Image: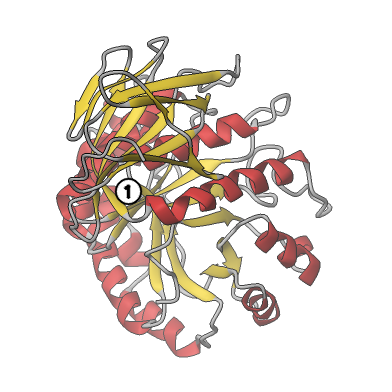
Amino acid sequence: MRMNRERLQIGAYCLAPYAHTMEHVREIAECGIDVMLCVPNDRALLDKLADQGVGAVVSGAVPGWFGGQGEQAGQMAIQNPLEEYERAARQFEDHPAVWGIDIGDEPSSLDFPHYGKVFDRVRRLFPNQFPYLNLYPGYAMVPWNTPEEKAFQLGTSDYAEYIERYCRSVASDYICFDFYPYAADVEGFLSNLHTVSEACRKYGRSLWVVLQVNSHRPEVWTSENRMLFQAYAAMAFGAESIFWACYTAGWWYHQVLDEQGNRTEQYDKLRRVNGELHGLGAEYMKFRCVKTHIIDGEPLDAGAFRQVCAEDGERLIVGEMASRCDDGRTALMICAAGDPQDEHPHKARIHFKSSKRIQAFGGAGEIEITPEAGGGGSLAVESCAGVLLTCGNGCNSGLG
């Protein structure tokens, strides 16, 4: 596989034909995007992406499938038999830019048994690529749906069962889902992250999530802080790949490029956000998430960290992290989540106590910690931003 799974990966959905020039591809790389999704299997475009070090998840290389409103739920095995994937593989020409093969989007759980076979077959037929499959968000099943409508789309009575059925049927090493909190709601977003992150820990899979850079309503532009909140909240739940929708025309309004291929104001916002995420990514990916807490004023004790809280009692999303190389190091990935709607930007001061050597990292590098009496310290974090607190293994020399 060409995707470096040891690195925090940042991607974006949709690359329309009007953005296939070398100048546009260069802008993708400069925006901090590692991989483009929903890319046509076009050799000239793939050559340009490879030249700029950008990967592609190609659509159309194998039969596609989209769950939509669920009208065809359970019909995939009939419409996309395994022989079609064999036929597609014989016609496929490999390319170094192709990291993944798109095998579908938002399927019903009624199609998971067939997807399990498709996933295994595509992985065998395309040894240099991974099969890419994105799942429904939790709001595919909303409270005002009838039981019949819920089953029609998800094929289950609740979202946790939908994810569980996926894990039992499809032997992927990741779970990817989309959720657009500024089209739905923030609490649902956090609930969705909780459900999928728990399944990832149970089944030993990576968490991938598709977030929004665009807007559901034409009168609203998604702010930089709203993007940061989505990404850092996902990282507090252990996300290892973050994909943005949409870069060019795909759905809704205010994409990163307009329909003439010109940058909108979202380009510079996304470039700064991606730069910050990559700036923190190297340190963040040394750890894996073992548990996530949402603090609403009550201090948190988590391992070597005690009385973790925001000064004014505002919400924090805190991911407990353990070293991937089992060297005893631990960390907290914290999202300052008191203002997810970006209505009153401010700095949040985070306090903690610890007898260990603690370092703090943000997107611009190491952050200075202000020592406090009794051990521990505090630091200021912008609202919607994130900070990684890392703890050394046994050093009692205080803050470093």
The answer to whether any part of residue 289 appears in the image is yes
Q: Quadrant of residue 316?
A: top left
Read off the residue under disc 1.
108
Q: Is 25 or 400 nearer to us in this picture?
A: 400
Q: Is 277 or 123 nearer to us in this picture?
A: 277
The answer to whether any part of residue 59 appears in the image is no
Q: Residues within 10 Å of mark 1 (few under 14, many from 20)?
A: many
Q: Position of residue 206 (x, y in %)?
A: 30, 55
| Residue drawn at point x = 34 percent, y = 61 percent | 76
| Residue drawn at point x = 31 percent, y = 57 percent | 174
Give SS at disc 1: loop
Q: Is residue 3 left or right of residue 260?
A: left
| Residue drawn at point x = 58 percent, y = 54 percent | 13
Q: Position of residue 287 (x, y in %)?
A: 30, 52
Residue furthest front as drawn? 397
Q: Position of residue 28 (x, y in %)?
A: 68, 60
Q: Is residue 170 above or below residue 149?
A: below
Q: Quadrant of residue 8?
A: bottom left
Q: Is residue 394 above or below residue 159?
A: below
The quarter in which the C terminus is drawn is top left
Q: Position of residue 388 (x, y in %)?
A: 39, 40
